[in-house]
Image (cartoon, helix red, strand yellow):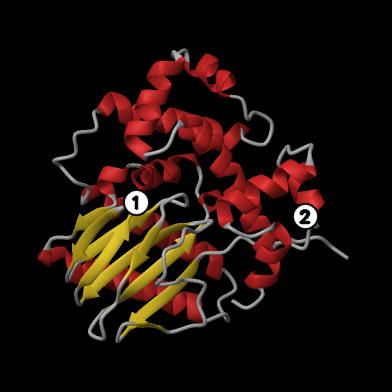
């Protein structure tokens, strides 16, 4: 059998507080194996992200990195969209916009009233192309719209953030390095050497901006990629573990279960329902 790995951008509409598809999103406390943009065009409610409760209303944006634990409550008046995607869709330049997701201080963004309608239109266009499979270049169209949306979101980022430009630059360098090397390099000293930085400074900076340690970031990046391959590919669990640099399959299974609360095989089985 030909082995496949389908990488997707998923677009869901929230209508009357409900998703319009049989979606893998959940309103219980959980984390994803992908990045997620939650756009609330109108309505109000609460969103718990990493133990901090956010009250949301019309024009609220939420940026969720894969490692964030979160739980969102929808009332019947909530309207909006959810975009879910893997960072592998983005080239190096586009990826810079994605760094906002790693900054825990930027998880909740309030979009100005005068821009909310325009941004909502971009989400509506993405939903249209996602739902209509007859477009031959649908994935390219969605990728381009995603880049537009991410660029606009960057302009709305919190001007009162206490994260310095130096810390954000180091975060960018670290994340891009992990993105390129995580399969072969899982030891922290490799990244310290490449960035010419002490372990303490790297740890302090990454922990402050993402909420987790550099070592945990690398591990979770690997496991999130594993989860995406389990969900979207036909490779065996052993093949996936090997391709991501895990030489001990039992260690991989234990680490995966600790992160996602289920074994790789159970994760694949459950993913077939969505």
111 to 19, vertically: above or below: above
Residue 216 x/y as whole percent? 51, 36
Q: Nearer the viewer, residue 166 or 198?
A: 198
Quadrant holding the C terminus: bottom right
Q: Nearer the viewer, mark 1 or mark 2?
A: 1
Q: Residue drawn at (69%, 59%), measured in percent from left and top?
A: 230
The reply to whether the C-beta atoms of the residues labelled 1 and 2 are less than 8 Å apart is: no
Dot 2: element: helix
Q: Which residue is mark 2?
A: 237
Q: Nearer the viewer, residue 271 or 155?
A: 271
Give the left or right position of residue 4, taking residue 172 as reference.
right
Q: Residue drawn at (33%, 35%), measured in percent from left and top?
A: 209
Q: In which quadrant of the rendered view does residue 138 lie?
A: bottom right
Q: Residue drawn at (46%, 49%), measured in percent from left and top?
A: 67
Residue 5 x/y as whole percent? 70, 59
Dot placed on the residue nearer the N-terminal end, 1 or 2: 1
Q: Is residue 5 visible?
A: no
239 to 44, vertically: above or below: above
Residue 173 x/y as whole percent? 44, 28
Q: Which residue is mark 1?
A: 50
75 to 201, vertically: above or below: below
Q: How many numbered marks does the figure carry?
A: 2
Dot 1: element: loop
């Amino acid at each position: 059998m030909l082995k496949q790995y389908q990488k997707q951008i998923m677009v869901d509409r929230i209508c009357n507080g409900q998703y319009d598809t049989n979606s893998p999103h959940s309103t219980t406390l959980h984390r994803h194996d992908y990045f997620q943009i939650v756009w609330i065009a109108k309505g109000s409610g609460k969103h718990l992200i990493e133990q901090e409760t956010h009250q949301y209303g019309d024009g609220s944006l939420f940026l969720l990195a894969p490692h964030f634990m979160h739980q969102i409550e929808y009332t019947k008046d909530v309207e909006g969209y959810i975009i879910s995607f893997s960072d592998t869709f983005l080239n190096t330049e586009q990826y810079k916009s994605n760094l906002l997701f790693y900054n825990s201080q930027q998880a909740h963004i309030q979009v100005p009233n005068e821009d909310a309608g325009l941004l909502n239109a971009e989400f509506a266009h993405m939903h249209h192309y996602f739902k209509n499979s007859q477009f031959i270049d649908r994935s390219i169209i969605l990728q381009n719209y995603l880049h537009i949306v991410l660029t606009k979101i960057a302009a709305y980022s919190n001007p009162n953030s206490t994260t310095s430009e130096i810390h954000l630059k180091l975060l960018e360098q670290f994340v891009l390095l992990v993105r390129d090397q995580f399969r072969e390099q899982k030891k922290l000293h490799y990244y310290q050497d490449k960035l010419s930085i002490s372990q303490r400074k790297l740890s302090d900076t990454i922990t402050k901006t993402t909420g987790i340690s550099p070592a945990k970031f690398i591990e979770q990046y690997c496991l999130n990629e594993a989860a995406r391959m389990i969900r979207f590919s036909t490779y065996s669990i052993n093949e996936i573990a090997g391709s991501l640099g895990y030489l001990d399959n039992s260690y991989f299974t234990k680490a995966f279960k600790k992160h996602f609360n289920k074994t790789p095989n159970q994760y694949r089985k459950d993913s077939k329902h969505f």
